[in-house]
Amino acid sequence: MKWMRGLLGLCWLVLLSGSALAAEPGKVEGKLIVDGKELKLNSVVSFLKEDFGKKYTTVVLTEKPVPAKAVQEDKLYQLAYSKEIQGIRLRFDDQGKFIGVIVYHPAFDGPSTEYQGFADFTKTRFDASVIQGKVSMDHQDFGEHSIHLEATFSAPVPKP
């Protein structure tokens, strides 16, 4: 009977560790201001994603933690449309090159378009285990929205 409890405990440990590899928390300090409304960025999660045969590291900085299931099933867009998450999504290629940023804010009807070339990212570290740096952006979105972003973060790079 003891061995069954031990086996059950081991199974739970394996299940929990598998989900931790899919989305890992880190540290963030920063703010996102859209149309004069400030949002403090308190939570960061990173995960790997493949689009059109290319692999990307995605880092999401938000006001409150993103549910792990939403990250694993890539339901960030649904959460943005329902205004359940607010923050930004950063995308990096498999070489660590910054691609762009998407804004999740109630001012948009769901997520914004991906801003490529409008945000600056200063990398302090990007290796097999950690991505860290500073992202900033001052942008007038086609005359509709003003966006100001300043954030410093560190996030584990999930294992494939």
Image (cartoon, helix red, strand yellow):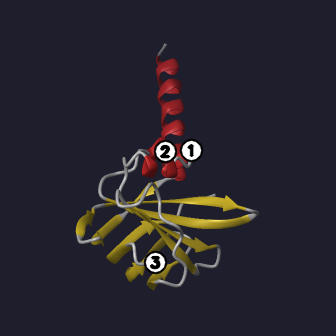
Q: Residue furthest front?
A: 143
- Residue at 67 percent across and 66 percent down: it is 55
Neighbours of disc 3 within 10 Å: few (<14), some (14-19), many (20+): few
Q: Residue furthest right?
A: 53
- Alpha carbon distance from label 1 to label 2: 5 Å
- Alpha carbon distance from label 1 to label 3: 32 Å
- Alpha carbon distance from label 3 to label 2: 30 Å
Q: Name the spot of residue 106 as percent of width and height, x first.
A: 35, 56
Query: Is residue 65 rendered to the left or right of residue 78?
Result: left
Q: Earlier in the sequence, mark 3 or mark 2?
A: 2
To which quarter of the image does residue 56 belong?
Answer: bottom right
- Nearer to us in this view, 158 or 91: 91
Task: Give, as a three-letter code, the residue at label 1.
Answer: Glu
Q: Name the spot of residue 80 as percent of width and height, x first.
A: 43, 52
Element under label 3? loop
User: Label 3 near label 1: C-beta < 8 Å?
Assistant: no
User: Label 2 near label 1: C-beta < 8 Å?
Assistant: yes
Element under label 2? helix
Residue picked out by circle 1 = 73
Q: Name the spot of residue 84 as percent of width and height, x first.
A: 36, 47
Total labels drawn? 3
Residue picked out by circle 2 = 70
